[in-house]
Every structure is written in structure tokens, then in C-alpha cells.
Amino acid sequence: MKLNVPPTKTNQLILKQDLAMATEGFDLLEQKREILVMELMHLLDRVKLVHQELEERRKKAYDTLKRAVSFNGYYHMRNIASGIRYDHKVSYQTRVAAGIRIPTLEIEQGEFKLQYGFAGTDSLVDQTMNDFLLLLEVVGKLAELESSVWLLARELKKTQRQVNALEHIFIPDYKETLKYIEQVLESKELDSFFTMKLAKKQMTEET
């Protein structure tokens, strides 16, 4: 749609600059969009793999827990669980992809120590604790990936809107307006040329 601006040479120059900036911005946003799409597809592949790993470790951890409960008894296992104190740390950092800060979570496992007496326990108790710690590690990994996917998807949607606006609104409007201004200016130049020519002819005839 043609912009509502006077067809002057000044506006023509301004619109040419605006069009150049819009075109450059479009190219940069297209590159950003492509990077975001590639990064998002890569992350989705990783999410799928981590989901599979999570399911495997979850099944293993609960299978071990069931065997431990079956062998040691529910109340005994509950007493052991209530006495467990495990210090682990979750570190939060960010990395940059396509200008977007993406969170990275890392669960630092504490040193594995027996936090209960040997009496009345067996290796299944240790194995249960170890399996659930490994499960926790995968949960942290999945949380990081899904958070990154959400951020990238949101940024991709925003970038796509900007690309569409430039491609289908701003750039076509600038081009159409420039074409109109060029036509008007050319018409004025022709009118001025013929007016001057006619004036010269009249002056010649008078002399």
C-alpha cells in the first residue's frame, strides 16, 4: 500500500534509505530465523533422546526400589529414606545462540556416602539411592533442554513476525511509494521540459 507522503525528492531520498535499511534488516532476520530453526531442531532431537533416557532410568530406579521394599519392608525403607541427607548443587549458567541467552542447568552430584547403618540393610538400598540420583541428573538435563526449547520457540515466533512484516508490508509499501514518487517526479520534469521548450519557441517567434 502506498504511503501517504508528498512526492518530493527529499522524501524519495528518505524512502530509498528506509528501503535499504529494511532490506538489510530482512536479510539479517532471515539469517537469524534459519539459525533459530536449526538450533531448535537440534534441541528437539536431544529432548527426544533425553526423554528415552529418562524413561529408562525411571523404570530402573523404581524397579530397584520395588525390590528393595520387597526385601527390606516398606516401613524399614521409609525410615531409611527419612534419614537420608544428600547435598547436591544446581548451577545455572547461560549460553548465547542467535543472540538469545539460553539457560544451562548442571546438577553437581555430591560425594556418595552411606548415610545409614549397615545393620538391617543390603546392597539394594545403596543401589536404589544411586539409581534415583542418576534419575535426578537426567531430570535436570531435561529441564534445561525444555527451557531452551521454549525460549527458542518464543524467539523464533517473534522473529518470524518481524520477517513477515518486512517482507509483506514495509518493503512492498516502500517500493510502491518510491515507484509513485518517481512517476510523479518524472511527470513534473517532463512538464517543466515542455513548458521551457514552449516558452523558448514563443520567444523565438516573437523575435
Image: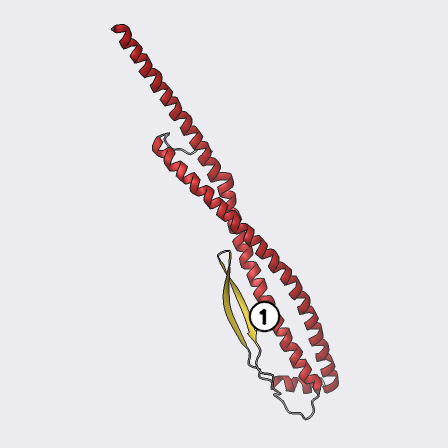
Above or below, 4 against 73 in this view is: above
* In this rendering, position of residue 203 left or right of residue 2: left
Q: Please name the residue shown 69% across and 76% down the image.
A: 61
Q: In the rendered image, which quarter is residue 148 located in?
A: bottom right
Q: Position of residue 178 (x, y in %)?
A: 42, 32
- Residue at the outermost bottom position: 119
Residue matched to label 1: 140
Q: In the rendered image, which quarter is residue 115 located in?
A: bottom right
> Quarter holding the C terminus?
top left
Q: Please name the residue shown 52% across and 51% down the image.
A: 32
Q: Position of residue 108 (x, y in %)?
A: 56, 76
Q: Nearer the viewer, residue 200 or 19?
A: 200
Above or below, 156 against 140 in this view is: above
Above or below, 22 against 107 in this view is: above
Name the residue type under label 1: Gly
* In this rendering, position of residue 22 left or right of residue 156: left
Q: Nearer the viewer, residue 86 or 190?
A: 190
Q: Please name the residue shown 56% across and 63% down the image.
A: 147
Q: Position of residue 57 (x, y in %)?
A: 68, 72
* In this rendering, position of residue 201 left or right of residue 59: left
Q: Residues within 10 Å of mark 1 (few under 14, many from 20)?
A: some
Q: Please name the residue shown 59% across and 68% down the image.
A: 141
* In this rendering, position of residue 159 left or right of residue 10: right
- For label 1, the SS is helix
Above or below, 60 against 24 in this view is: below
